[in-house]
Image: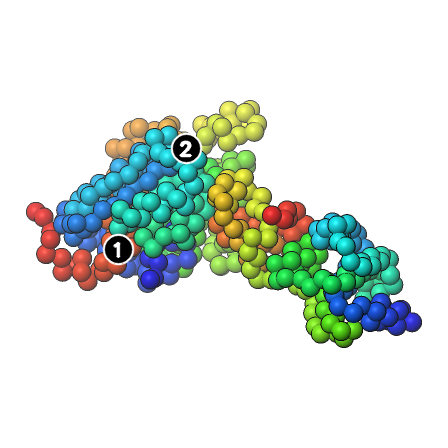
Amino acid sequence: MEQNKENMMVAALENGSVIDHIPTNKLFTIVQLLDLEKFKEEVVIANNLKSQVMGKKGLIKISGKFFSEAEISKLAVVCPNIRLTVIKDYEVKEKREVTLPEKLTNIVKCANPVCITNNEPMKTVFYRKDMETLKCRYCGKEQKLKDIKLK
Amino acid sequence: MENRSIVSIADYGKEKIQYLLDMAAEFEAHPNRQILKGKVVATLFFEPSTRTRLSFETAANRLGARVIGFTDPKVTSSSKGETLKDTIKMVSNYADVIVMRHKLEGAALYASEVTNVPIINAGDGSNLHPSQTMLDLYSIYKTQGTLENLNIYMVGDLKYGRTVHSLLMSMRKYNPTFHFIAPKELEMPEEYKLYCKQNNINYIEQQDFTEDTIADADILYMTRVQRERFTDLMEYERVKDAYILKTNMLGKCKENMKILHPLPRVNEIEYDVDESQHAYYFDQAQNGLYAREALICDVLGITLDQIKNDNTIIG
Protein backbone atom coordinates (compact mmCIF):
# COMPACT_ATOMS: atom_id res chain seq x y z
CA MET A 1 0.00 0.00 0.00
CA GLU A 2 2.75 2.42 1.04
CA GLN A 3 4.76 1.42 -1.97
CA ASN A 4 1.83 2.21 -4.25
CA LYS A 5 1.31 5.55 -2.67
CA GLU A 6 4.94 6.40 -3.21
CA ASN A 7 4.76 5.26 -6.80
CA MET A 8 1.77 7.50 -7.34
CA MET A 9 3.67 10.47 -6.02
CA VAL A 10 6.62 9.78 -8.27
CA ALA A 11 4.52 8.95 -11.29
CA ALA A 12 2.58 12.15 -10.93
CA LEU A 13 5.70 14.10 -11.75
CA GLU A 14 6.08 14.97 -15.43
CA ASN A 15 9.67 16.24 -15.30
CA GLY A 16 11.81 16.61 -12.24
CA SER A 17 13.58 14.85 -9.38
CA VAL A 18 12.57 12.87 -6.34
CA ILE A 19 14.80 12.63 -3.28
CA ASP A 20 13.82 9.61 -1.26
CA HIS A 21 15.07 7.75 1.83
CA ILE A 22 15.78 10.99 3.67
CA PRO A 23 16.22 10.48 7.42
CA THR A 24 13.33 12.37 9.07
CA ASN A 25 15.67 14.62 11.06
CA LYS A 26 17.50 15.67 7.90
CA LEU A 27 14.48 16.61 5.78
CA PHE A 28 14.42 20.29 6.61
CA THR A 29 18.19 20.60 6.38
CA ILE A 30 17.86 19.50 2.78
CA VAL A 31 14.93 21.84 2.16
CA GLN A 32 17.13 24.65 3.36
CA LEU A 33 20.19 23.47 1.44
CA LEU A 34 18.26 23.38 -1.83
CA ASP A 35 16.70 26.74 -1.07
CA LEU A 36 13.30 25.31 -1.93
CA GLU A 37 11.51 28.22 -0.32
CA LYS A 38 12.34 30.32 -3.36
CA PHE A 39 11.50 27.62 -5.85
CA LYS A 40 8.63 28.63 -8.17
CA GLU A 41 7.50 25.27 -9.48
CA GLU A 42 5.63 22.49 -7.74
CA VAL A 43 7.37 21.06 -4.69
CA VAL A 44 6.10 18.26 -2.47
CA ILE A 45 7.74 17.82 0.90
CA ALA A 46 6.71 14.83 2.96
CA ASN A 47 7.98 13.52 6.26
CA ASN A 48 7.42 10.55 8.56
CA LEU A 49 6.33 8.34 5.69
CA LYS A 50 6.49 4.68 6.54
CA SER A 51 9.52 2.90 5.17
CA GLN A 52 10.38 -0.79 5.29
CA VAL A 53 14.07 -0.06 5.39
CA MET A 54 14.21 3.01 7.61
CA GLY A 55 11.05 2.85 9.70
CA LYS A 56 10.19 6.42 8.87
CA LYS A 57 11.55 8.61 6.14
CA GLY A 58 11.26 11.93 4.39
CA LEU A 59 10.71 12.56 0.69
CA ILE A 60 10.97 15.60 -1.56
CA LYS A 61 9.56 15.86 -5.05
CA ILE A 62 10.61 18.81 -7.16
CA SER A 63 9.10 19.59 -10.50
CA GLY A 64 11.39 20.82 -13.27
CA LYS A 65 14.55 20.33 -11.24
CA PHE A 66 17.55 18.26 -12.34
CA PHE A 67 20.54 18.18 -10.04
CA SER A 68 24.10 18.89 -11.10
CA GLU A 69 26.89 16.62 -9.84
CA ALA A 70 27.98 19.39 -7.48
CA GLU A 71 24.49 19.61 -5.97
CA ILE A 72 24.35 15.83 -5.64
CA SER A 73 27.69 15.88 -3.85
CA LYS A 74 26.35 18.44 -1.41
CA LEU A 75 23.32 16.28 -0.76
CA ALA A 76 25.60 13.32 -0.19
CA VAL A 77 27.64 15.19 2.40
CA VAL A 78 24.63 16.43 4.33
CA CYS A 79 22.75 13.22 4.02
CA PRO A 80 24.52 10.09 2.77
CA ASN A 81 22.53 7.17 1.35
CA ILE A 82 19.53 9.03 -0.01
CA ARG A 83 17.96 7.86 -3.24
CA LEU A 84 17.63 10.17 -6.20
CA THR A 85 15.16 9.51 -9.00
CA VAL A 86 15.08 11.52 -12.21
CA ILE A 87 11.75 11.71 -14.05
CA LYS A 88 11.33 12.75 -17.67
CA ASP A 89 7.98 12.58 -19.46
CA TYR A 90 6.45 10.70 -16.52
CA GLU A 91 9.11 8.00 -16.80
CA VAL A 92 11.89 7.08 -14.45
CA LYS A 93 15.06 7.95 -16.35
CA GLU A 94 17.53 7.32 -13.61
CA LYS A 95 17.48 5.94 -10.10
CA ARG A 96 20.58 6.05 -7.97
CA GLU A 97 21.69 5.68 -4.40
CA VAL A 98 23.60 8.82 -3.59
CA THR A 99 26.67 7.95 -1.57
CA LEU A 100 29.56 10.03 -0.43
CA PRO A 101 31.92 10.52 -3.41
CA GLU A 102 35.62 9.68 -3.06
CA LYS A 103 36.58 13.25 -3.88
CA LEU A 104 34.67 16.46 -3.15
CA THR A 105 35.74 19.60 -4.98
CA ASN A 106 34.66 22.92 -3.55
CA ILE A 107 31.75 21.46 -1.59
CA VAL A 108 33.06 21.45 1.96
CA LYS A 109 34.75 24.14 4.03
CA CYS A 110 37.84 23.14 5.99
CA ALA A 111 37.42 23.49 9.74
CA ASN A 112 41.10 24.29 10.21
CA PRO A 113 41.43 28.11 10.38
CA VAL A 114 45.10 27.98 9.37
CA CYS A 115 44.44 25.84 6.32
CA ILE A 116 45.44 27.60 3.10
CA THR A 117 41.92 27.03 1.70
CA ASN A 118 40.46 29.41 4.29
CA ASN A 119 42.91 32.16 3.44
CA GLU A 120 43.20 32.09 -0.32
CA PRO A 121 40.53 32.41 -3.05
CA MET A 122 40.71 28.76 -4.10
CA LYS A 123 38.68 25.57 -4.33
CA THR A 124 38.69 23.13 -1.44
CA VAL A 125 39.32 19.46 -2.10
CA PHE A 126 38.38 16.71 0.31
CA TYR A 127 38.90 12.97 0.08
CA ARG A 128 36.65 10.37 1.64
CA LYS A 129 38.57 8.48 4.27
CA ASP A 130 35.63 6.37 5.31
CA MET A 131 31.88 6.89 5.21
CA GLU A 132 32.01 9.21 8.21
CA THR A 133 35.29 11.01 7.66
CA LEU A 134 36.68 13.45 5.11
CA LYS A 135 40.31 14.53 4.80
CA CYS A 136 41.43 17.92 3.49
CA ARG A 137 43.81 17.63 0.53
CA TYR A 138 45.78 20.66 1.66
CA CYS A 139 46.24 20.65 5.43
CA GLY A 140 45.57 16.94 5.85
CA LYS A 141 43.17 17.47 8.74
CA GLU A 142 40.30 15.04 9.07
CA GLN A 143 36.72 15.99 9.78
CA LYS A 144 33.70 13.97 10.79
CA LEU A 145 30.80 14.21 8.38
CA LYS A 146 28.44 15.27 11.17
CA ASP A 147 30.57 18.37 11.86
CA ILE A 148 30.97 19.40 8.23
CA LYS A 149 30.21 22.91 7.06
CA LEU A 150 29.43 23.43 3.40
CA LYS A 151 31.25 26.04 1.39
CA MET B 1 55.42 18.60 -17.60
CA GLU B 2 56.03 16.40 -14.60
CA ASN B 3 55.91 18.43 -11.43
CA ARG B 4 59.02 17.59 -9.45
CA SER B 5 58.05 19.59 -6.37
CA ILE B 6 58.84 18.27 -2.91
CA VAL B 7 55.90 19.07 -0.67
CA SER B 8 56.09 15.98 1.51
CA ILE B 9 58.40 12.98 1.73
CA ALA B 10 56.08 11.00 4.00
CA ASP B 11 55.04 8.75 1.14
CA TYR B 12 58.52 8.24 -0.34
CA GLY B 13 59.56 4.61 -0.57
CA LYS B 14 62.87 3.18 0.62
CA GLU B 15 64.41 3.40 -2.82
CA LYS B 16 63.76 7.12 -3.22
CA ILE B 17 64.96 7.86 0.31
CA GLN B 18 68.15 5.89 -0.25
CA TYR B 19 68.67 7.75 -3.53
CA LEU B 20 68.45 11.10 -1.74
CA LEU B 21 70.71 9.89 1.09
CA ASP B 22 73.32 8.79 -1.46
CA MET B 23 73.01 12.17 -3.13
CA ALA B 24 73.50 13.97 0.20
CA ALA B 25 76.60 11.84 0.85
CA GLU B 26 78.05 12.98 -2.50
CA PHE B 27 77.49 16.58 -1.47
CA GLU B 28 79.09 15.98 1.89
CA ALA B 29 82.20 14.68 0.11
CA HIS B 30 82.20 17.66 -2.27
CA PRO B 31 79.87 20.42 -1.10
CA ASN B 32 81.22 23.16 -3.39
CA ARG B 33 80.37 22.93 -7.06
CA GLN B 34 79.13 24.90 -10.03
CA ILE B 35 76.48 22.37 -11.04
CA LEU B 36 73.73 24.99 -10.69
CA LYS B 37 75.60 27.75 -12.47
CA GLY B 38 73.14 29.91 -14.36
CA LYS B 39 70.20 28.80 -12.21
CA VAL B 40 68.17 31.07 -9.99
CA VAL B 41 66.77 29.76 -6.70
CA ALA B 42 64.02 31.83 -5.07
CA THR B 43 63.62 31.62 -1.31
CA LEU B 44 60.20 32.96 -0.37
CA PHE B 45 59.87 33.15 3.39
CA PHE B 46 56.31 34.28 4.05
CA GLU B 47 57.14 33.43 7.64
CA PRO B 48 60.60 34.19 9.01
CA SER B 49 62.86 31.21 9.73
CA THR B 50 66.49 32.21 9.84
CA ARG B 51 67.94 28.76 10.33
CA THR B 52 66.10 27.08 7.46
CA ARG B 53 66.58 30.01 5.10
CA LEU B 54 70.32 30.26 5.70
CA SER B 55 70.68 26.54 5.16
CA PHE B 56 68.80 26.60 1.84
CA GLU B 57 70.57 29.75 0.64
CA THR B 58 73.96 28.29 1.54
CA ALA B 59 73.06 25.09 -0.32
CA ALA B 60 72.11 27.08 -3.44
CA ASN B 61 75.20 29.29 -3.22
CA ARG B 62 77.60 26.40 -2.73
CA LEU B 63 76.24 24.78 -5.89
CA GLY B 64 76.78 27.93 -7.93
CA ALA B 65 73.18 29.14 -8.18
CA ARG B 66 72.07 32.70 -7.59
CA VAL B 67 69.50 33.39 -4.93
CA ILE B 68 66.60 35.84 -4.93
CA GLY B 69 63.80 36.14 -2.44
CA PHE B 70 62.49 37.71 0.71
CA THR B 71 62.87 36.94 4.37
CA ASP B 72 59.89 38.70 5.78
CA PRO B 73 56.39 38.99 4.28
CA LYS B 74 56.02 42.53 5.65
CA VAL B 75 58.19 43.83 2.83
CA THR B 76 56.32 41.96 0.09
CA SER B 77 53.11 42.55 -1.77
CA SER B 78 51.39 39.78 0.21
CA SER B 79 51.09 42.41 2.94
CA LYS B 80 49.16 44.49 0.40
CA GLY B 81 46.72 41.66 -0.04
CA GLU B 82 48.28 39.84 -2.98
CA THR B 83 47.25 36.20 -3.07
CA LEU B 84 49.77 33.41 -2.70
CA LYS B 85 48.89 32.28 -6.20
CA ASP B 86 49.79 35.66 -7.72
CA THR B 87 53.08 35.85 -5.83
CA ILE B 88 54.05 32.34 -6.95
CA LYS B 89 53.01 33.07 -10.55
CA MET B 90 55.11 36.22 -10.56
CA VAL B 91 58.22 34.60 -9.07
CA SER B 92 57.83 31.63 -11.45
CA ASN B 93 58.79 33.99 -14.26
CA TYR B 94 62.16 34.60 -12.65
CA ALA B 95 63.27 31.47 -10.82
CA ASP B 96 64.11 27.85 -11.70
CA VAL B 97 63.10 26.56 -8.28
CA ILE B 98 61.10 28.07 -5.44
CA VAL B 99 61.87 27.29 -1.81
CA MET B 100 58.99 28.51 0.33
CA ARG B 101 58.06 28.76 3.95
CA HIS B 102 54.52 29.74 4.91
CA LYS B 103 52.54 29.90 8.12
CA LEU B 104 49.45 28.35 6.55
CA GLU B 105 49.03 24.59 6.28
CA GLY B 106 48.84 23.26 2.72
CA ALA B 107 50.38 26.43 1.24
CA ALA B 108 53.24 24.55 -0.44
CA LEU B 109 50.95 21.98 -2.02
CA TYR B 110 48.71 24.71 -3.37
CA ALA B 111 51.73 26.63 -4.70
CA SER B 112 52.91 23.49 -6.50
CA GLU B 113 49.53 23.30 -8.23
CA VAL B 114 49.62 26.81 -9.68
CA THR B 115 53.08 26.72 -11.28
CA ASN B 116 55.33 24.48 -13.34
CA VAL B 117 58.38 25.67 -11.45
CA PRO B 118 59.26 23.08 -8.80
CA ILE B 119 58.45 24.02 -5.22
CA ILE B 120 60.40 22.86 -2.19
CA ASN B 121 58.36 23.04 0.99
CA ALA B 122 60.51 24.62 3.69
CA GLY B 123 57.71 24.30 6.22
CA ASP B 124 53.99 25.02 5.98
CA GLY B 125 52.65 25.91 9.40
CA SER B 126 52.61 22.93 11.72
CA ASN B 127 51.98 20.63 8.78
CA LEU B 128 55.12 19.45 6.96
CA HIS B 129 58.83 20.20 6.83
CA PRO B 130 60.39 17.62 4.50
CA SER B 131 63.92 19.07 4.38
CA GLN B 132 64.12 18.74 8.17
CA THR B 133 62.98 15.12 7.90
CA MET B 134 65.53 14.47 5.18
CA LEU B 135 68.38 15.84 7.28
CA ASP B 136 67.17 13.80 10.27
CA LEU B 137 67.16 10.66 8.15
CA TYR B 138 70.59 11.48 6.79
CA SER B 139 71.93 12.07 10.31
CA ILE B 140 70.53 8.76 11.52
CA TYR B 141 71.83 6.90 8.48
CA LYS B 142 75.25 8.46 8.75
CA THR B 143 75.72 7.77 12.44
CA GLN B 144 74.16 4.30 12.55
CA GLY B 145 75.15 3.06 9.10
CA THR B 146 71.56 2.00 8.48
CA LEU B 147 67.97 3.08 8.99
CA GLU B 148 66.84 -0.47 9.76
CA ASN B 149 65.78 -1.90 13.15
CA LEU B 150 66.73 1.07 15.30
CA ASN B 151 65.54 2.04 18.76
CA ILE B 152 64.48 5.63 18.42
CA TYR B 153 63.60 7.56 21.56
CA MET B 154 61.57 10.72 21.12
CA VAL B 155 61.56 13.01 24.12
CA GLY B 156 59.71 16.16 25.14
CA ASP B 157 56.88 17.73 23.19
CA LEU B 158 55.51 14.91 21.08
CA LYS B 159 52.12 16.53 20.69
CA TYR B 160 53.02 19.63 18.71
CA GLY B 161 56.47 18.56 17.51
CA ARG B 162 56.15 18.54 13.74
CA THR B 163 59.62 17.06 13.28
CA VAL B 164 58.91 13.96 15.37
CA HIS B 165 55.67 13.29 13.49
CA SER B 166 57.37 13.53 10.09
CA LEU B 167 60.27 11.38 11.22
CA LEU B 168 57.90 8.77 12.59
CA MET B 169 56.06 8.50 9.28
CA SER B 170 59.15 8.44 7.10
CA MET B 171 60.71 5.64 9.19
CA ARG B 172 57.74 3.30 8.81
CA LYS B 173 59.40 0.94 6.33
CA TYR B 174 62.57 0.45 8.38
CA ASN B 175 61.16 -1.58 11.27
CA PRO B 176 61.97 0.92 14.02
CA THR B 177 60.99 0.65 17.67
CA PHE B 178 59.88 4.00 18.99
CA HIS B 179 59.89 5.07 22.61
CA PHE B 180 57.71 8.08 23.26
CA ILE B 181 58.83 9.90 26.40
CA ALA B 182 56.62 12.86 27.16
CA PRO B 183 54.54 14.49 29.88
CA LYS B 184 50.88 13.51 29.80
CA GLU B 185 49.83 16.83 28.32
CA LEU B 186 52.28 16.59 25.44
CA GLU B 187 52.09 12.89 24.62
CA MET B 188 52.07 11.53 21.10
CA PRO B 189 48.66 12.25 19.53
CA GLU B 190 46.25 9.38 19.01
CA GLU B 191 46.38 9.69 15.20
CA TYR B 192 50.11 8.91 15.15
CA LYS B 193 49.73 5.99 17.51
CA LEU B 194 47.03 4.70 15.19
CA TYR B 195 49.41 5.25 12.28
CA CYS B 196 51.99 3.09 14.08
CA LYS B 197 49.45 0.32 14.65
CA GLN B 198 48.27 0.40 11.04
CA ASN B 199 51.87 0.19 9.80
CA ASN B 200 52.99 -2.42 12.33
CA ILE B 201 55.44 -0.04 13.98
CA ASN B 202 56.39 -0.97 17.54
CA TYR B 203 56.11 1.77 20.10
CA ILE B 204 56.37 2.10 23.83
CA GLU B 205 55.04 5.07 25.77
CA GLN B 206 56.58 6.19 29.01
CA GLN B 207 56.79 9.27 31.16
CA ASP B 208 60.06 8.52 32.98
CA PHE B 209 63.19 10.01 31.49
CA THR B 210 66.18 8.50 33.31
CA GLU B 211 69.56 6.91 32.73
CA ASP B 212 67.89 3.50 32.76
CA THR B 213 64.98 4.28 30.47
CA ILE B 214 67.27 5.52 27.68
CA ALA B 215 70.00 2.88 28.03
CA ASP B 216 68.81 0.96 24.99
CA ALA B 217 68.54 3.93 22.61
CA ASP B 218 70.29 4.19 19.25
CA ILE B 219 68.88 7.64 18.65
CA LEU B 220 67.69 10.08 21.30
CA TYR B 221 65.61 12.72 19.57
CA MET B 222 65.14 15.64 21.95
CA THR B 223 62.55 18.42 21.52
CA ARG B 224 61.66 21.51 23.46
CA VAL B 225 58.96 21.47 26.12
CA GLN B 226 57.49 24.93 25.71
CA ARG B 227 55.62 26.75 28.43
CA GLU B 228 53.01 28.14 26.03
CA ARG B 229 51.89 24.63 25.09
CA PHE B 230 50.46 23.99 28.55
CA THR B 231 46.90 24.82 29.53
CA ASP B 232 47.75 23.97 33.11
CA LEU B 233 50.81 25.96 34.18
CA MET B 234 51.14 24.02 37.41
CA GLU B 235 51.56 20.94 35.28
CA TYR B 236 54.28 22.76 33.34
CA GLU B 237 56.12 23.69 36.53
CA ARG B 238 55.90 20.08 37.64
CA VAL B 239 57.28 18.55 34.43
CA LYS B 240 59.57 21.23 33.01
CA ASP B 241 62.70 19.82 34.60
CA ALA B 242 61.79 16.19 34.07
CA TYR B 243 62.69 16.22 30.38
CA ILE B 244 66.12 17.79 30.53
CA LEU B 245 69.02 15.68 29.34
CA LYS B 246 72.01 15.77 31.69
CA THR B 247 75.48 14.30 31.30
CA ASN B 248 74.99 11.93 34.23
CA MET B 249 72.16 10.24 32.32
CA LEU B 250 74.51 9.05 29.60
CA GLY B 251 76.42 6.53 31.77
CA LYS B 252 74.59 3.43 30.56
CA CYS B 253 73.85 4.39 26.99
CA LYS B 254 75.04 2.44 23.97
CA GLU B 255 78.32 3.35 22.30
CA ASN B 256 76.62 4.21 19.00
CA MET B 257 73.87 6.33 20.57
CA LYS B 258 73.52 9.84 19.14
CA ILE B 259 71.51 12.77 20.44
CA LEU B 260 69.55 14.71 17.86
CA HIS B 261 67.64 17.96 18.28
CA PRO B 262 66.01 20.08 15.56
CA LEU B 263 67.27 23.25 17.29
CA PRO B 264 66.91 25.87 18.64
CA ARG B 265 67.56 24.40 22.05
CA VAL B 266 66.62 26.28 25.19
CA ASN B 267 67.39 24.28 28.30
CA GLU B 268 66.33 20.73 27.43
CA ILE B 269 69.91 19.60 26.80
CA GLU B 270 72.38 20.83 29.41
CA TYR B 271 75.35 22.60 27.89
CA ASP B 272 77.95 20.18 29.21
CA VAL B 273 76.28 17.41 27.16
CA ASP B 274 77.75 19.21 24.12
CA GLU B 275 81.15 17.77 25.07
CA SER B 276 79.85 14.20 24.97
CA GLN B 277 80.67 11.92 22.04
CA HIS B 278 76.94 11.29 21.84
CA ALA B 279 76.04 14.92 21.09
CA TYR B 280 75.23 15.23 17.42
CA TYR B 281 72.83 18.17 17.07
CA PHE B 282 75.30 20.62 15.57
CA ASP B 283 76.53 18.04 13.03
CA GLN B 284 72.87 17.35 12.35
CA ALA B 285 72.37 20.99 11.39
CA GLN B 286 75.38 20.77 9.08
CA ASN B 287 73.89 17.68 7.47
CA GLY B 288 70.97 19.94 6.62
CA LEU B 289 73.17 21.68 4.09
CA TYR B 290 73.93 18.42 2.23
CA ALA B 291 70.33 17.23 2.45
CA ARG B 292 69.14 20.54 0.99
CA GLU B 293 71.73 20.46 -1.78
CA ALA B 294 70.29 17.05 -2.68
CA LEU B 295 66.67 18.28 -2.60
CA ILE B 296 67.39 21.30 -4.80
CA CYS B 297 69.19 19.14 -7.38
CA ASP B 298 66.49 16.49 -7.29
CA VAL B 299 63.66 18.92 -8.08
CA LEU B 300 65.75 20.36 -10.91
CA GLY B 301 66.02 16.90 -12.45
CA ILE B 302 69.73 16.49 -11.77
CA THR B 303 70.43 12.80 -11.17
CA LEU B 304 72.72 10.99 -8.75
CA ASP B 305 74.79 9.83 -11.73
CA GLN B 306 75.30 13.40 -12.87
CA ILE B 307 76.35 14.38 -9.36
CA LYS B 308 78.81 11.47 -9.15
CA ASN B 309 80.31 12.41 -12.52
CA ASP B 310 80.18 16.13 -11.89
CA ASN B 311 83.19 17.99 -13.33
CA THR B 312 82.20 21.30 -11.75
CA ILE B 313 83.51 20.37 -8.29
CA ILE B 314 85.55 23.14 -6.70
CA GLY B 315 88.50 22.39 -4.45
Does residue A143 lie above or below B232 as drawn? below
Does residue B307 lie above or below B125 as drawn? below
Q: Can residue B240 be seen in this view?
A: yes
Q: Which residue lies furthest to the left in this view?
A: B315
Please state if B238 lies on the left or on the right of B249 as rendered.
Answer: right
**Which chain letter goes with mark 1?**
B
Please state if B126 lies on the left or on the right of B100 as rendered.
Answer: right
Q: Which of B120 and B244 is in front in this view?
A: B120
For marks 2 and 1 on the same chain, the one whose residue lies earlier in the sequence:
2
Q: Can residue B187 be seen in this view?
A: no
Q: Quadrant of residue A64?
A: bottom right
Circle 1 SS class: loop
Q: Quadrant of residue A16?
A: bottom right
- What residue sits 34% from the left and 30% below the top? B75
**Is circle 2 on the same chain as circle 1?**
yes
The amino acid on which the numbered mark 1 sits, given as a three-letter code, is Leu
Q: Nearer the viewer, residue B31 or B254?
A: B31
Circle 2 SS class: helix
Q: Position of residue A26 (x, y in %)?
A: 76, 53
Q: Which of B94 and B36 is in front in this view?
A: B94
- What residue sits 65% from the left and 56% below the top? A74
Q: How crowded is mark 2: few (under 14 residues within 10 Å), some or many (20 or more)?
A: few
Q: Where is residue A7 in the image (x, y as percent from the top left)?
A: 84, 71
- What residue sits 33% from the left and 45% below the top? B90
Mark 2 against mark 1, which lies toward the viewer? 2
**Which chain letter goes with mark 2?**
B
In the rendered image, which residue does mark 2 sit on? Answer: B80
- What residue sits 49% from the left and 59% below the top? B200
State which quarter of the image contains the N terminus of chain B: bottom left
Q: Position of residue B7 (x, y in %)?
A: 38, 51
The amino acid on which the numbered mark 2 sits, given as a three-letter code, is Lys
Task: Name the mark on residue B300.
Answer: 1
